[in-house]
Image (spheres, helix red, strand yellow):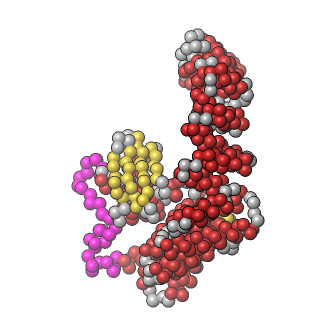
Amino acid sequence: MMQMGSWKNWFQPHILERGRTYFDEGRVSDLERTEDSYTATVEGTEEYEVEILLDGDSIEDMICDCPYAEDGNACKHMAAVLFAVAAAEPSKKKAPAKKECLTPASLVEKIPDSQLRPLLTELVSADEKLYRALLLRYGKTSLDECMKTLRKELTFIGRQYADRDGYIDYYHAGAFSEAIADHIQRQTETLLARNEPLLAFQAGVDALREYSGYGIDGSNGEYGLVMEAMEDMCVDVLAATDEIVAEKIFDLLAGCAKSDQEEWFVQEFASQMVFSHFAGKYFDEKKLALVDEQISALTLSGKKDYSSEYKIEKLLTCRFDLMKKLSSPKEELDAFLNRYTSYSNIRKLCVQQALDEGKTDEAIRLLEEGKSADRDKRGLVAGYSEWLTDLYERQGRRDKLIAELEYHVFVLSSGGMEMLNRLKKACAPAQWIEYRERYLSGRNYYRLELMESEGLWERLMEAVAAAGSLSILDRYEAALKKRYPNEMLEAYACILTKEAAAASDRKRYQELARYLKKLRNYPGGAERAAQLAEDWRTRYIRRRAMMEELRNAGF
């Protein structure tokens, strides 16, 4: 949790600066204050929804649906919203004089023309990076020299952070990724200023290849940071191009997406850009051709591993969507689905199409086939089975419904209390008792929850005590404390005795002390807690931290 006044500390410097730019460009809209949050929409490569969760005057959490934030990172969209909040609700503290809040653009406007060049000269002299950026953009260097300089900078970045084996460890991965993202942004600005959008795009891809060539410990989401910089580059370049150059960029991306010579990270970027930033019949037809090439290559490779199967299913689904966009005849769509029904994603499309056409029996046949074909993929089969239970219930086919629910609960061990409750509802009372006892006789995950739901209190008390877990005792305490106070007290005492023997740090001692205080709420609990505390003082006298925590808790 962080005070509102220090929110900028949550952001990496370049992310904070991008957020300020987004705010300055007016990309934040629909800013609203609720009782415990701010919400807003930020226009980036798409429209992203941002929520700043508050706890009083502090920020409790920040949420954005952009890819970079999905990995737990503080993104530029969050920063943009917080700049908007700061502008909308300035500090309530009294100040001797009202301070003027200026954007970079408005600040420059205030500088007299006669002072601009001397000031810029001073800044350029003190900042080598700024000097090189201006030299590349406004100097008389040739385009070839410009590109050589950019490539040298890129190589230098890698040498700064990589070890002799070309590996960038956890401690340097963030700074390296930031430097690459910043380089991509600066070179894009430089080359677009020189009216070279195609070259700007190629330079961005070269930077991504350089980045992908290093072994990186990217466990903090560094890949997402670079991917976001690349997507920004792509958007900026496409905004500055005509149709001819856009077609060339598409072809370059398509080549990267299907090339086995590219690193997976480059292929992933290329595929994302192809399918998210090029619209219209011309590009859809080219996407279709690309997908066909990729499907053919995967099929010819003969690979049957999980990754290959996942890729081909994704491509087949994409192809079907493109066929619909291009208004392919229904006969072609049906033939395509029938040809690839063995793939689970296509089977699901077939099922949905059958249902849309009112062919429920055909949908059921496909789902039953899927259960057999994908029997080694429990999650998929559970999905088919749940779909079948819905269809049988809708049709009023009680026997089929009960049989499918029985399969779901006892064979797949899936669905939890929802499926158990559906089975109970579908069965006659006597039949349900048989199913219930069958479930309780096994080592099923929801046994205790089912006992509670069915009001089997004595059996629940025995099972909870036998589990030997404080968390399980806590979970069912409300249901059992009034019914079995003595048994619950002894169950807690037994587990706490074992926990005390294994405890070895102050945090655990504090938790044990809190449980002792909790026992006082039971009849006879004060005496039992005192007995436990006295026993621990005798057994563990050398554990000074434990003795302190017992005294702090009043024992």
- Is 57 drawn above or below residue 108 in the view shown? above
Task: Give whichever of 539, 464 is nearer the camera.
Answer: 464
What residue occupies the far left of the structure in this picture? 97
Residue 228 part of the magenta-drawn span: no
- Which image quadrant is residue 152 in? bottom right
Across and down, in percent, residue 439 comes to 69, 27
- Which one is nearer the viewer's eye here, 516 or 424? 424
- Residue 58 position, x and y percent, is 40, 44
Whether residue 210 is visible, yes or no, is no
Is 101 magenta? The answer is yes
Q: Residue at x 46, y 80 (%)?
A: 243
Give the residue at x 75% y 68%.
Answer: 301
- Please report the residue visible at 62 percent of the width from the left and 42 percent of the height from the top: 388
Residue range in magenta is 90-119
Q: Is residue 465 left or right of residue 244?
A: right
Number of disc labels:
0
- Comparing 104 with 293, the one in front is 293
Quarter placement of the C terminus: top right
Q: Is residue 71 visible?
A: yes
Q: Residue at x 75, y 60 (%)?
A: 304
Q: For residue 43, what is the image quadrant?
A: bottom left
- Residue 257 in the image: state x and y as whole percent: 62, 71
Q: Nearer the viewer, residue 487 or 405?
A: 405
Residue 12 at x, y = what percent?
Answer: 49, 59
In this view, 278 is above or below 544 = below
